[in-house]
Amino acid sequence: MFNQPELFIDTVQNAKKQWVQKCVRNEDIKNNCHIYIDAQSKFLKTALTVAGGIATIVGHEMLNTKIEKMFNPFGIDFFKAGWDAWADANREAYAKKS
């Protein structure tokens, strides 16, 4: 099966090379443009590989983690903890105003 993102990168980079070949007359500039386009292509393919690896690892970790552990890793009762913190903050605020 074709690797669609790499195929797209190659298509765009080849179009750039063809444009440089047709439109740029100075050989030094033409050669430097080709070197730059090749460097862009290598960078994009590396970035694509790294992003794919990260997405794969994150996907595997999400599948191997229980849902409640993923959303509440420490087993905290957020409603109670949040209510107590809110109440304490309000008591302190009213005490300072009085």
Image (spheres, grey):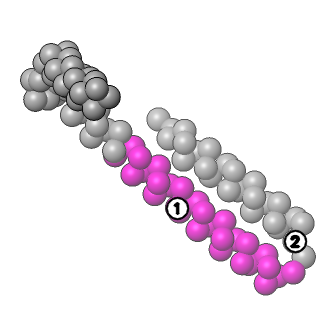
Looking at numbered disc 1 in the image, what kind of residue is underneath it?
Phe
Does the magenta portion include 48?
yes
Q: Which residues are magenta?
A: 26-53
Residue 17 tag number: none
Query: Residue 23 or 44: which is nearer the viewer?
Result: 44
Which quadrant is home to the C terminus? top left
Q: Residue at x 62, y 52 (%)?
A: 10
Residue 48 screen position, x and y as percent: 47, 49
- Quarter holding residue 61: top left
What is the secondary structure assignment of the residue under circle 1?
A: helix
Q: Is residue 71 above or below residue 3?
A: above
Dominant secondary structure, magenta: helix
- Quarter holding residue 35: bottom right
- Say whether disc 1 or disc 2 marks the residue closer to the N-terminus: 2
Query: Residue 44 or 85: which is nearer the viewer?
Result: 85
Q: In the rendered image, which residue does mark 2 sit on?
A: 24
Residue 33 screen position, x and y as percent: 73, 72
Query: Residue 70 or 27: which is nearer the viewer?
Result: 70
Looking at numbered disc 2 in the image, what kind of residue is underneath it?
Val
Crowd rating for badge 2 (residues with CA inside 10 Å; few <14, some 14–19, many 20+):
some
Q: In the rendered image, which residue does mark 1 sit on?
A: 43
Examine the rendering and report whether any part of residue 71 can be seen: no
Q: Residue at x 68, y 56 (%)?
A: 13
Is residue 40 rendered to the left or right of residue 98?
right
